[in-house]
Amino acid sequence: MLHKDSYKQHISAQFNAELESVKNHLLEMGGLVEQQIGKAVESLLSRDSGLAEEVIAGDEQVNELEINIDEECSRILARRQPAASDLRLVLAISKVTTDLERIGDEASKIARQAVKSVEEGGSSAGSSFVEIRHIGNHVSDMLRRSLDAFARLDVDMAVQTVIADREVDSEYASAMRSLVTFMMEDPRTIGPVLGQMWSLRSLERVGDHASNIAEHVIYLVRGLDVRHVEPDDLVAQVEEHP
C-alpha cells in the first residue's frame, strides 16, 4: 500500500526523469547542430557538394528534434505545472531549442551556398575563405561553450560566451569591408563574393544564437534577464545577482 509521502516521492522521481530526458534531448540536438555547422563550413571551403547535400538533408532531423522537444516541454507544463526553478528550466529549454533550430537553418544556408558555388564553378578571386574558416571556428567554439554552460549550469562560461560575440561581430565587419573592396576593384568577382558574404552573414548569426543560448543559461541559473545588457556591464550585473 502506498502512503501519501511515498506517492509524492514517486511523482517527484518521475518528474525528475522527465526533466532529465528533455535536457538530454536538447543536448542531443545541440550536438547535431554543432556537426551541421562544421560540415557546412567544410563543404564551402572544400567545394564539396556531396557534404553540403548531407547538411541540407540533415536539417530535417534538426527540425524533428525541435518538434519533439517542444512537445515534451508542453507535456511537462500541462501535467506538472512546474514552479520556480523547474519552470525556468522548461522555459529555457524551449528557448534554447528555438535558437538551435535557427542555427541549423544557417548551416543549411551555408551548405546551399556551397552547392551553388560548385554548380557555378565559382572563382576563388576575392576569396574570404580564411575569414570564413576563422569565424566558423570561432562561432563553433561559442556554440560548444554555450551548450557546455547549459549542461553544467556554468554562469561564468555563459558570460564569457556572450562577451565573445562582440569579437565575432568585429571580425565579421572586417571581413565584409574586405569583400566590398574586392568587388569595387574587380566587378567580375561580384557573384562569388556575394555568396561568401551571405555565408559570413550566416556565421555571424550563429554567433548571435550561441550568445542567446548563453543568456538563457544565465536566466536559468540566476533568474536574471541579460538580453539587453551591454557586454561591458554584463559581469557586474551577474555579480550583483549571486
Image (cartoon, rainbow, N blue to C red):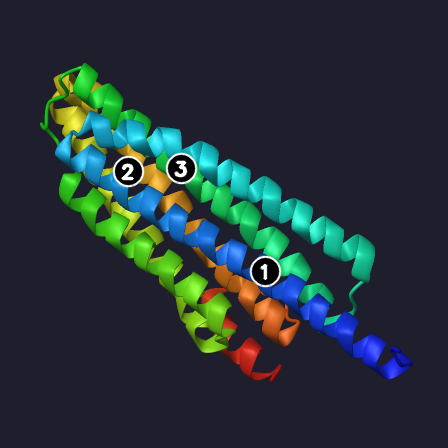
Type of amino acid at the residue the image marks with label 3:
Glu
Type of amino acid at the residue the image marks with label 1:
Ser
Seen from the viewer's position, the closer of residues 203 and 76 is 76
Instruction: Specify few, some or many for label 3: CA neighbours under 10 Å numbering under 14, 14-19, or 20 or more.
Output: many
**In this picture, is 224 found above or below 128?**
below
Q: Residue at label 3?
A: 106
Q: Which of marks 3 and 2 is nearer the N terminus?
A: 2
Instruction: Specify few, some or many for label 1: CA neighbours under 10 Å numbering under 14, 14-19, or 20 or more.
Output: some
**In this picture, is 187 found above or below 127?**
above
Seen from the viewer's position, the closer of residues 126 and 21 is 21
Q: Earlier in the sequence, mark 1 or mark 2?
A: 1
> Could you say which disc has been placed on residue 21 in the image?
1
Type of amino acid at the residue the image marks with label 2:
Ala
Q: Residue at label 2?
A: 40
Taking the spot 12% from the left edge, 31% from the top edge, the residue there is 126
Please give left or right for residue 165 compared with residue 213 in the image.
left
C-alpha distance separating marks 3 and 2? 9 Å
Circles 1 and 3, Cβ within 8 Å, touching? The answer is no
Taking the spot 36% from the left edge, 29% from the top edge, the residue there is 56
